[in-house]
Image (cartoon, helix red, strand yellow):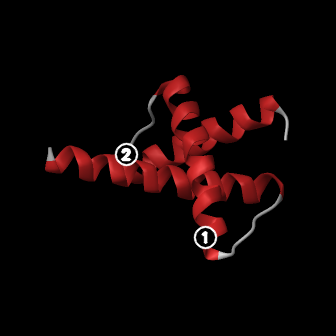
Amino acid sequence: MGFIAWLIIGGLAGWIAGNIMRGGGFGILGNIGVGVVGAVLGGFLFGLLGLQAGGFIGSLVTATVGAVVLLWVISKIKQSG
């Protein structure tokens, strides 16, 4: 997948996850960062579960799930600290 597509999917996934988890996005760079890290995490988690998603929509779903998990873990770390 091209670099531009990674940025687009990362930005969208980060924005969606931000709206799901705390009611707002993180700005364009924050959304991209959360989305890209979420894509890696989502790909890892989907692989553990034996799931595979292809195409733009599949990549977006994978990245969004990973980003939501990432934000959930971060919120739990902040609560305990």
- Closer mark to the observer between disc 1 and disc 2: 1
Question: Of helix, strand and loop, which one carries label 1?
Answer: helix
Q: Residues within 10 Å of mark 2 (few under 14, many from 20)?
A: few
Q: Is residue 34 left or right of residue 1?
A: left
- Mark 1, Cα crowd under 10 Å, few <14 / some 14-19 / many 20+, is few
The amino acid type found where label 1 is placed reads Leu
Q: Which residue is mark 2?
A: 23
- Nearer-the-camera pick, 71 or 80: 80
Residue sitting at 83 percent across and 56 percent down?
55
Residue 51 horizontal/vertical position (percent): 69, 73
Residue with the mark numbered 1? 48
Residue drawn where x is 73% and y is 37% of the image: 6
Q: Position of residue 21 (x, y in %)?
A: 38, 51
Residue at disc 2, secondary structure: loop
Left or right, residue 12 beside residue 16: right
Q: Is residue 7 left or right of residue 78?
A: right
Q: Amino acid under label 2?
A: Gly
Query: At 74% across and 60% down in the image, what residue appears?
Result: 58
